[in-house]
Amino acid sequence: MGTDYSGMETPLIALKALGVRYRHLFSSDICPKARLVIQEMFKPEKLFGDATKRRPEELPGKLDLYVAGFPCQVFSLVSQLAGHHRGPARPLEHFETCVKTIKACRP
């Protein structure tokens, strides 16, 4: 199992609730507070910050399940008006990161 843009790891919470066993190979989140929660509660083997800065060779290789939840803040009008979040310089950057991860890990 690997997750990107992991947030509070809702997919892992769902798997646990369903009684599904998994090995947590990696997670990523750009938010330091989210990474702290992920590290303490879910203990991934690797924890990345900004997934768009990660190199494919840093990934664990083959995995069975990959979940990515795009960062919603960049699409929020309220966040943009408040000046909290701006969209990525390249709008497809997050999608491209997921494609690179899928190619590297072949879930």
Image: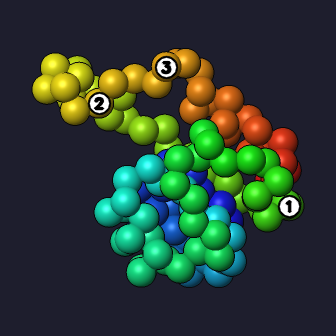
Q: Position of residue 105 (x, y in %)?
A: 82, 53
Q: Quadrant of the N terminus?
A: bottom right
Q: Is residue 76 left or right of residue 47?
A: left
Disc 3, SS: loop
- Secondary structure under tag 2 reads loop
Can you give x and y, in whole percent of width and height, for residue 98 in the image? 67, 39
**Residue identified by numbered label 3:** 89
Label 2 is placed on what type of residue?
A: His
Q: Amino acid at mark 3?
A: Ala
In the image, which is nearer the foreground, mark 1 or mark 2?
2
Residues 50 and 10: in front is 50
Residue bearing mark 1: 62
Disc 3 to disc 2, how far (Cα)? 12 Å
> Residue drawn at (82%, 54%), measured in percent from left and top?
57
Q: In this rendering, does residue 59 appear at all?
A: yes
Residue 26: image x %, image y %?
64, 65
First reached walking from the N terminus: tag 1 or tag 2: 1
User: Which is nearer the N-term, disc 1 or disc 3?
Assistant: 1
Is 25 on the left-hand or right-hand side of 35? right
Kindly identify the amino acid type of the residue bearing the numbered disc 1: Lys
Q: Which residue is mark 2?
A: 85
